Image (tube, rainbow, N blue to C red):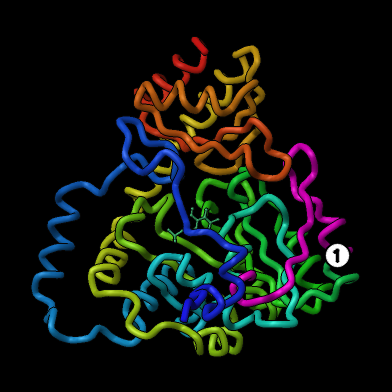
Amino acid sequence: MQRDIKNLLNPALRNIAVYKVEGGQQAEIKLNQNESPFDLPLWLKEEILGEFQREPWNRYPEILPYKGMKAYADFLGVSPDSVMMSNGSNEMLYTIFLACLGPGKKVLIPDPSFSLYEKIALLLQSQIISVPMHPGLDFDTEAILQAANDEKVDFIVLSTPNNPTSKSITIDEIRMIAGSADAIVLVDEAYIEFSRQRSALELIDELPNVIVLRTMSKALALAGIRIGFAISNPLLMAEISKPKIPFASGRLAEITLMHVLANYSLVSDMVSYILNQRDKIYGELLTINDIEVFSSDTNFLIIRVKDAVSVFRSLHNEGILVRNVSGYHLMENCLRFNIGLVEENQRLIDKLRTL
Ligand SMILES: Cc1ncc(COP(=O)(O)O)c(C=O)c1O
């Protein structure tokens, strides 16, 4: 009997694809994944590895990394039962979506936004209510408020500052949305350390339906270690922790987190460097004819060129890897690149000028 294996699987798999990074993950100048260009200094890595070496590797870690969660809670000034750690914030997105969605549920996602939201919602067979950004890529708060109420959505996901647009929504707008919609509101603050806006953390005591998501992969320069966090009031946290994969964070992640928090001035210095460079590059891009540059609230910039595919290829041929984000709604012929080291940024700008 010839079986169609696909019929045996979750029907949602027909609508989603395997995650890919166009152009790959290797390049001389790698600016395509919004990472930090800085690695941790060797002395700090040695401190971390020394502690990790003394761990019993044959034993399970705690179900959740309670020490790391307490350290992060203290760092943020919230109670430890408001915080949950994950193996990267992507893993936490799966956990939170599992807790909030399922067949018959509706999720509001501004468009364009981080592609994983749509993918998990489709997997969970939930209905997606897409709300387009303004043509200049800013959030359309009026439209979000209207759609949330008209469609009676159960869940709203706001990435702010948003990937891939680099734009933010204000805390007052988030308060308005979370205050008026009968929905859980997830605020993904992956890039908050680079933002001019205040964090939505101050809303978690005020509004029972707000969850904040954080990652250590961007400003904290730990993409390879995989650390993410959810923060909400303890009641909601107790619920969203139910679908959490047990033992997902290893001891290396927890130890690394604690050492980096104890040396946070390193992070502040890296963020200042990146923000200085971002403003400098933004200014330089404004002077290049045929390039439109969008103001950014993140560690990356969006530019619009005449032909994104050909510019992407020309840069790639020079060893410079950026992300072609042209496929996103409203982002035709747009490229995204994160801020790198001074010399990397200069090479990118020089090349863009010649193109
Ligand atoms: C908006 C947003 N959320 C979440 C993530 C996932 O980050 P990680 O799983 O590395 O914590 C990213 C990564 O690019 C992102 O841009």
Instruction: Give the residue displayed 86% in from the left and 57% down from the top.
Output: 143
Q: Position of residue 308 (x, y in %)?
A: 58, 27
Give above or below for 297 relative to 64: above
Q: Is residue 168 left or right of residue 301?
A: right
Q: Position of residue 13 (x, y in %)?
A: 56, 69
Give above or below for 282 relative to 83: above
Q: Residue furthest front?
A: 1
Instruction: Give the residue displayed 64% in from the left and 53% down from the top.
Output: 113
The residue that disc 1 covers is 147
Give above or below for 282 relative to 15: above
Viewer-closest of 64 and 328: 328
Q: Secondary structure at mark 1?
A: helix
Viewer-closest of 318 and 253: 318
Q: Is residue 138 magenta?
A: yes
Instruction: Give the residue displayed 50% in from the left and 41% down from the top.
Output: 299
Viewer-closest of 81 and 104: 104
Say what amino acid the circle numbered 1 marks: Ala
Q: Position of residue 121 (x, y in %)?
A: 63, 70
Q: Position of residue 54 (x, y in %)?
A: 9, 74
Q: Is residue 124 left or right of residue 218?
A: right
Q: Which residues are magenta?
A: 121-146
Query: Residue 340: which quarter of the image?
Result: top left
Instruction: Give the residue displayed 69% in from the left and 71% down from the top.
Output: 185
How many marks are shown on the rendered structure? Answer: 1
